[in-house]
Amino acid sequence: MKFLVICAATLALYGCTYPASSIEQGSESGHLRFSDSPIGAQISVDGQPHGARTDAQPLVFDVAPGKHSIEEIENGQVLFQRDYEVGAGSTLEIRTAN
């Protein structure tokens, strides 16, 4: 019994001295790619305007890894809204057309 108490106390003390750590997703940007949004529709990421497609070329934005709220707005009306999780170094194709 005494042995178990000593082992438990040792493990408890060892756990107190173990350095704290955190897991980070990575510092490399992720990318959002819009290829079917209407020409002229404003793209908003996390409530901030990021631009609009001006021609047939896809629109690509760099974003920090993590969760982002995407909106597509045209003439003051929200056409599309959805949350996405973007990984570090990944490109996420956002399809908004029905």
Image (tube, helix red, strand yellow):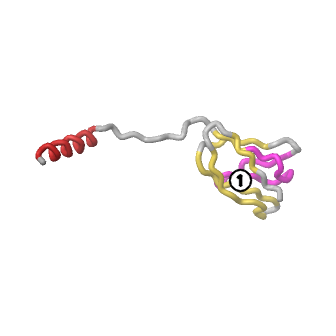
Q: Which quadrant of the figure contains the C terminus?
A: bottom right
57 within the magenta span: no
Residue 35 belongs to magenta span? yes
Quadrant for residue 82, please give it: bottom right
Q: Residue at x 59, y 47 (%)?
A: 66
Residue 23 vertical placement versus 84 (above, below): above
Residue 22 % position (x, y): 43, 41
Say which of 67 and 61 sits in front: 67
Residue at (81, 54) in percent of width and height: 41
Pinpoint residue 77: horizontal percent, then vertical percent: 78, 64
When the figure is inspected, residue 27 is found, relative to residue 93, above or below; the finding is above
Q: For this view, does 23 lie left or right of residue 29?
A: left
The percent position of residue 81, horizontal first and vertical second, equals 71, 60
Numbered range of the magenta stretch: 33-54
Direction from residue 21 to residue 75 in the image, left or right: right
Q: Residue 1, position in %: x, y?
A: 12, 48
Farthest-out residue, front = 1
Q: Which residue is mark 1?
A: 44
